[in-house]
Image (cartoon, helix red, strand yellow):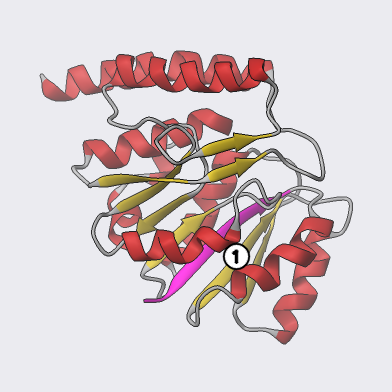
């Protein structure tokens, strides 16, 4: 199976230098797509150099910080334009361990979407303040209660999709950003009837760079779940 790993970046050159060879070394038929938001530290230019010498590396250049959600949407569209059978999304900061990629691919043989979960048995979260952990955990409980989405971790960003899943979802209709993007894409896939499986991961807080969490992102996610609940009710009617 051909696998495309989509990684959004902003000032992640130091991480990409290490991440790229680790991703490419996990499976014989894996490719890497970096979606760079005009990183001032030269992340995009560095990946250009990798792509020039390795056809398995691809890069999309965006003019500036345009949001995580739109980066993934553009990355998914690019991946669908290739022959990839599976599309994996992950962060560049090593909070998502590239060693898990083969496990995601293996589990995708049974289901349509595999979610690397922080909140099921066997999972762990490392280096998060207790307040941040509680916020994330209860945000996921809240999401499950309001939307009915059958996931313990709806906001996680380490996922593997079969290509037909993303082909079936209207990516242009996705407007959410940040953590709410993860909720919305999961919800849209679930409402299409695709099967989802969670596997435990060890999530390690980023060791380089800065967190993308903001108050705006938290509020966006808070109100998004009610919009999704309304969509579900109207769809049922």
Q: Over which residues does the magenta segment extend?
A: 1-9
Q: Is residue 105 above or below residue 168?
A: below
Q: In the image, is residue 7 part of the stretch drawn in magenta?
A: yes
Q: Is residue 163 above or below residue 168?
A: below
Our reading of the magenta stretch's main secondary structure is: strand
Q: Nearer the viewer, residue 37 or 110?
A: 110
Q: How many marks?
A: 1
The answer to whether residue 82 is visible is no
Q: Nearer the viewer, residue 101 or 224?
A: 101
Q: Is residue 32 left or right of residue 12?
A: left
**Residue at x 19% of width, y 19% of height:** 234
Q: In the image, is residue 98 part of the stretch drawn in magenta?
A: no
Q: Residue furthest left?
A: 237
Quarter of the figure that contains the C terminus: top left
Query: Residue 108, located in which quarter of the rendered image?
Result: bottom left
The answer to whether residue 27 is visible is yes
Quarter of the figure that contains the N terminus: bottom left
**Residue at x 55% of width, y 73% of height:** 26
Q: Position of residue 199 (x, y in %)?
A: 39, 47
Q: Residue furthest front?
A: 122
Q: Is residue 1 left or right of residue 182?
A: left
Q: Position of residue 225 (x, y in %)?
A: 39, 18
Q: Nearer the viewer, residue 91 or 69?
A: 91
Residue hosting label 1: 33
**Residue at x 12% of width, y 23% of height:** 236
């Amino acid at each position: 199976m051909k696998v495309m790993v989509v990684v959004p970046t902003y000032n992640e050159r130091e991480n990409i230098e290490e991440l790229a060879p680790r991703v490419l070394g996990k499976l014989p038929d894996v490719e890497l797509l970096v979606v760079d938001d005009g990183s001032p530290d030269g992340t995009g230019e560095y990946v250009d150099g990798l792509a020039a010498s390795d056809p398995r590396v691809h890069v999309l250049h965006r003019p500036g910080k345009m949001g995580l959600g739109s980066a993934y949407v553009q990355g998914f569209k690019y991946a669908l334009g290739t022959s990839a059978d599976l599309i994996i999304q992950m962060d560049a900061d090593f909070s998502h361990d590239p060693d898990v990629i083969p496990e995601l691919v293996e589990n995708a043989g049974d289901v349509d979407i595999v979610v690397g979960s922080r909140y099921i048995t066997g999972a762990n979260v490392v280096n998060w303040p207790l307040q941040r952990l509680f916020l994330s955990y209860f945000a996921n409980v809240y999401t499950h209660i309001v939307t009915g989405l059958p996931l313990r971790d709806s906001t996680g960003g380490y996922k593997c999709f079969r290509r037909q899943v993303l082909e079936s979802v209207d990516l242009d209709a996705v407007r959410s950003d940040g953590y709410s993007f993860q909720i919305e894409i999961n919800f849209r896939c679930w409402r299409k009837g695709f099967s989802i499986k969670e596997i435990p991961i060890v999530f390690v807080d980023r060791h380089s760079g800065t967190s993308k969490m903001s108050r705006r992102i938290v509020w966006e996610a808070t109100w998004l779940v009610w919009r999704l609940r309304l969509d579900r009710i109207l769809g049922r009617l």
